[in-house]
Amino acid sequence: MGPLVPFIISEEFSLVIAFFLGIGFGFVLEQAGFSSTKKLVGLFYGYDFTVLRVFFTAGVTAMAGTLLLGHYGLLDLSVIYVNPTFLKSALLGGVIMGAGFIIGGFCPGTGVCALAIGKLDALAFVFGAILGVWAFIESFPLLESIYYADAMGPVRISDFLGMSNVAFGFLLSLMAIGAFVATRLIENKVNKRKPTIERRKRNRYALAAASLFVVLAVTAFLPGKQDIINMKIAEAKRQQTCVFKEIPADKLADEIVNKYYALNVIDVRTPEEFEAFHLPMAINIPFEKMMERQYEPLFKQRLKTNIFYADGDTLVRMACLKAKYIGKSENMIMKESALEFREMFYEAQAPSAEAPKGELQVYHFRTNTARQMNDLVDALKNIGAPVKREAVKIKGGC
């Protein structure tokens, strides 16, 4: 649930969900017969491939759901934790775990499941697993070089093969269907059964396979959330229906001094440009990162007015349009650029003594306002920007 926290599920509520999911997972394992060693080792003897089919089903289902949610911006795929790959230790560990699976008749999860219903062989298996973990910890200095050998980092198979996630999804789905057919044939041969499947089951299998490929096709060929927003922006520009609320720099400066709590001043330039100079109380949301989940609350709220600015007229208008299609907040753009704001308030040239009264008043207003903005920033520097809600990668694995 890591990628859903904290935007859809709160951190506290995620623990409650995890608790009930754990209970449900254990119940399903036991009801499916995975607390029986006969069911589990049947994979290695060829008479029951239920374990393989269950793992493939879980894998392709989670994969399709993840791709679909990510495609429409409901899930941030960038925060999904990918276990780093250490090729040599992974192969060696797979051999050891496979041997333990055959000898003990359980994997760690099913062993705990069987222990929960009181099976003594599971008790021996879990106790042995704990001893094995302890032995590994104690001998780790001797095994460290093997453990970290052939480090490949958090690489995905799709990246390793040089293909997109969706393309690999199609490939994995075909592999899963091929494995289902092949294992069914092996089971029939080992158990000496006739290779027949009930019509009802055959229809269910066909529907499940078709649904999987429909989901993958949607992610492959239909536009995602970002594509839809970009198309809306392009259409608005083509139809010339873009209407922007503009606020002059003088008025914005006065609003910052007197009503800073009602504004979100948003700088859509690069972080380097933001660090070089930015408006008081401004926050930096680079244009190319506006679609990130952490910024969505700013664009969906209606309590504050979002005021965008940049160095170019085109960029700030594009940002305002994008914010409009992301959320429902009130959005405005500063009429002047960031450079012009700096020249107006922080590099203002004193007028001559013979200058008109209005010019003198503007100069005094801007210099006083610049000083007040600096004082405000110093006074509120700890709360000058909204707290970012960042989704943290949940580390771990099976």
Image: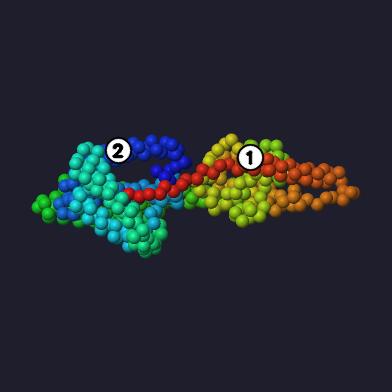
Which residue was labeled with disc 2?
A: 24
Q: Nearer the viewer, mark 1 or mark 2?
A: 2
As helix, strand or loop, the secondary structure at mark 1 comes to strand
Task: Tell me the amino acid under the disc marked 1.
Answer: Leu
Q: Mark 1 packing: few (<14 Cα in 10 Å), some, or many (20+)?
A: some
Judging depth in this view, the residue of 166 and 4 nearest the camera is: 4
Judging depth in this view, the residue of 289 and 124 nearest the camera is: 124
Q: Which residue is painted at 26% across and 43% down in the image?
A: 112
Q: Earlier in the sequence, mark 1 or mark 2?
A: 2
As helix, strand or loop, the secondary structure at mark 2 comes to helix
The N terminus, quarter of image? top left
Which residue was labeled with disc 1?
A: 263
x, y (%) of residue 204?
Answer: 23, 45
The span from disc 1 to disc 2 (Cα, nearest Å) is 46 Å
Place residue 301 in its image quadrant: top right
Q: Which residue is painted at 45% across and 51% down in the image?
A: 78
Residue 71 in view (yes/no): no
Q: Mark 2 packing: few (<14 Cα in 10 Å), some, or many (20+)?
A: few
Task: Tell me the amino acid under the disc marked 2.
Answer: Gly
x, y (%) of residue 267?
Answer: 62, 49
Q: Which mark is residue 251?
A: none
Left or right of 393? Residue 42 is left
x, y (%) of residue 98?
Answer: 24, 55
